[in-house]
Amino acid sequence: MDVLKRETDMFVRQDFDGWAECWVQDARAREVCVSSSFGATVLEGWESLSRYMQNVMANGATYEISDIQRLNVNVTVSGNIAHVVYDETSRHANGRIENTFETRVLERSDGIWRILYASFVLRGHQQIDASRLAVDAKGKILCAPDEARKKLENHKGLQISNNRLRATRPSWDKLLQAGLECAAEQHGYFQHYRYISESGRSFRFPVVFGETDEGNVIVCVLFVRDGLTFVETESDGDVEARMTVAKTIFGLSEGQMSLAYRIVQGDNLIAASEELGISKNTARTHLSRIYEKTGVNSQTALVRTLLSVG
């Protein structure tokens, strides 16, 4: 553990020689870095690894880390080989918190431990997830950044009650819980892998609650990553992609598409017409034509239909 701490300290200080002393310097050295945002980077052999790290440190590409905590540490020693796994939490200079799953294999030579293999998995899209809630299969809040909580305050269909995500109406809550249950079925890596293989896309589940008294259709989107369910309270690129497909499938005109998009965004008919700069009568005409093309007769059913394609 002293070697692991020293290796991290030398990395942060950009001290290449000190960092290199912590490693086995032969062809067996290997480092694997994995994140949802950046994919996987694999460095094999000391020549490749050292050249890469020299460049990183020379160009100031390291980052300032503080408050490093290593949790759930498990060390297994067999002869001159040690296997170490732990969870790490650290704070970066910009205030961002990173959580990683870490694995190290060390070899002892002449009584000195050095790192032979290192890997870490960075959990989550660190920047994007600042605006998202993360929940478990029952809706228990696992992560609720300040930005996500602020967005939730403006969402008329969702609330946090006793540290659980709940809908604001009983009938809506049944829809939410059903959606969370459906999402939880994809929490396992192989289950989600199979889903993606069969459908050609990651799991995303739009929950269309219904209309408010003012005529706004309330929606949230559930998606799965890292064995968790994330909750989008605002539309994202996936919704826009589905709308583009819906436009083609139902033969919507540009005007009809624009109105439909505003309704999916949560606007009632009056707000949508004002946003689009058209009269209320024109908006009603567009909506009537959209109903005819999609075979529905309510805004709730329309949103559900539009978000079910793609």
Image (tube, rainbow, N blue to C red):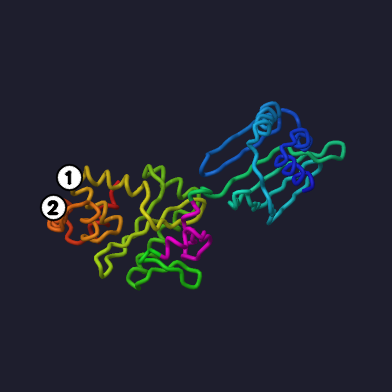
Numbered circle sitting on residue 289: 2
**Looking at the picture, how far across and down is residue 298, in whole percent?**
20, 62
- Magenta-tinted stretch: 129-153
Picture residue at 68% right of the left edge, 40% below the top:
118
Q: Tag 1: Cα neighbours inside 10 Å, few (<14), some, or many (≥20)? A: some
Q: Nearer the viewer, residue 201 or 65?
A: 65
Q: Which residue is mark 1?
A: 253
CA–CA distance in space, label 1 to label 2: 10 Å
In the rendered structure, are the residues bearing label 1 and label 2 in contact, judged by CB atoms less than 8 Å apart?
yes
Q: Tag 2: Cα neighbours inside 10 Å, few (<14), some, or many (≥20)? A: some
Q: Amino acid at mark 1?
A: Ser
In the image, 200: left or right of 74?
left
* Mark 1 / mark 2, whichever is N-terminal: 1
Picture residue at 22% right of the left edge, 48% below the top:
257
Picture residue at 69% right of the left edge, 54% below the top:
69
Q: How many marks?
A: 2
Q: Amino acid at mark 2?
A: Arg
